[in-house]
C-alpha cells in the first residue's frame, strides 16, 4: 500500500484508492447554526480526490466512512456540487458507512456510489470505518483523524498523518476541516509534511 500526501492510500495491485472522513456538509452544518465559515472547503477536497484518482489511474475509490457529516448539512447545493464532480470521475466509488453517515442512502443514487459492508475483505485486507482487529487480516480504517503536534522551542505545528500498526492502518481525515490529534497509539505515525509523507518520527507531544 502506498501512502500518499493527498491524505489517501493507493493499492497498486487493485488500482484502488482508499480515503476516509471527508465529512462533506460539515461547513454547511456549522453555517446552519450561525457560524461564519468560508466557502470552498468541499471544492478543494473534491479537486484533491479527483487529482489523486487521476494520478494513480485508480479504477475504484473506497471511502472508509464519514463521507458525510450530518443530515442538516446535506443540502441541495451540496448534492448538486458532488453530482457534478462525480460525472467527471470515472472510477467506481464504494462507501463503508461511518457513524456520521446517517443520510448516506439519500446521496448514494445521485452521486452514483455504492455501499460497501463493514469488514468486506479483498486479498490480505479488510475495510472498516472504526479500527477493528481481524485475525490474519490487515484492516484499513479511518474515524480517529490521526494527527500529532511537533514542537521545537516555542514553535509548534500539528500535522495529519497515517497511523500504521501490525494489523490496522488508520488513514488521516481527508478533509482539512478536522482537528485530529488523538492519542495516536498502537502503531507508527507517518506525518504528511507538505507534498510528502515523512518517515515515522517520535515528536514531543503538546
Image (tube, rainbow, N blue to C red):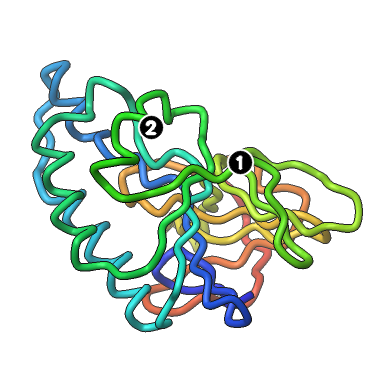
Q: Residues within 10 Å of mark 2 (few under 14, many from 20)?
A: many
Residue at image coords 17%, 39%: 79
Residue at image coords 39%, 69%: 6
Residue 80 quadrant: top left
- Counting from the top left corner in percent of width and height, residue 46 is at 25, 58
Q: Are marks 1 and 2 in contact (CB under 8 Å)?
A: no
Residue at image coords 47%, 57%: 19
- Which residue occupies the extreme top position in the image? 33
User: Is 125 above or below relative to 16?
Assistant: above
Q: Secondary structure at mark 2?
A: helix
The numbered disc on residue 44 is: none
Say which quadrant the C terminus sits in: top right
Q: Disc 1 to disc 2, how far (Cα)?
A: 13 Å
Disc 2 target residue: 104
Say which quadrant the N terminus sits in: bottom right
- Counting from the top left corner in percent of width and height, residue 103 is at 35, 26
- Counting from the top left corner in percent of width and height, residue 73 is at 22, 27
Residue 76 quadrant: top left
Q: Secondary structure at mark 1?
A: loop
For residue 124, side relative to residue 46 (left or right): right
User: Is 16 above or below relative to 81?
Assistant: below
- Counting from the top left corner in percent of width and height, residue 7 is at 44, 63
Q: Residues within 10 Å of mark 1 (few under 14, many from 20)?
A: few
For residue 165, side relative to residue 78 (left or right): right
Q: Nearer the viewer, residue 47 or 113?
A: 113
- Which residue occupies the extreme right position in the image? 135
Disc 1 target residue: 117
Q: Nearer the viewer, residue 196 or 29?
A: 29
Q: How many marks?
A: 2
Sequence-wise first label, 1 or 2: 2
Amino acid at each position: 500500500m502506498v501512502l500518499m500526501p493527498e491524505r489517501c492510500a493507493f493499492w497498486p495491485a487493485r488500482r484502488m484508492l482508499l480515503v476516509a472522513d471527508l465529512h462533506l456538509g460539515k461547513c454547511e452544518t456549522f453555517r446552519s447554526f450561525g457560524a461564519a465559515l468560508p466557502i470552498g472547503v468541499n471544492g478543494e477536497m473534491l479537486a484533491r480526490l479527483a487529482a489523486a484518482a487521476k494520478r494513480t489511474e485508480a479504477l475504484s475509490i473506497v471511502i472508509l466512512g464519514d463521507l458525510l457529516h450530518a443530515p442538516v448539512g446535506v443540502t441541495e447545493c451540496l448534492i448538486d456540487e458532488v453530482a457534478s464532480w462525480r460525472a467527471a470521475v470515472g472510477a467506481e466509488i464504494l462507501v463503508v458507512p461511518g457513524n456520521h453517515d446517517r443520510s448516506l442512502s439519500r446521496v448514494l443514487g445521485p452521486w452514483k456510489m455504492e455501499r460497501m459492508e463493514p469488514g468486506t475483505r479483498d486479498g490480505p485486507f479488510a475495510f472498516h470505518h472504526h479500527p477493528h482487529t481481524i485475525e490474519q487480516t490487515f484492516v484499513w480504517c479511518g474515524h480517529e483523524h490521526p494527527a500529532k503536534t511537533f514542537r521545537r522551542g516555542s514553535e509548534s505545528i500539528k500535522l495529519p498523518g497515517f497511523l500504521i500498526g501490525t494489523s490496522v492502518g488508520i488513514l488521516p481525515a481527508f478533509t482539512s476541516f478536522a482537528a485530529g490529534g488523538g492519542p495516536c497509539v498502537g502503531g507508527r505515525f507517518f506525518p504528511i509534511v507538505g507534498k510528502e509523507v515523512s518517515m515515522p518520527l517520535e515528536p514531543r507531544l503538546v
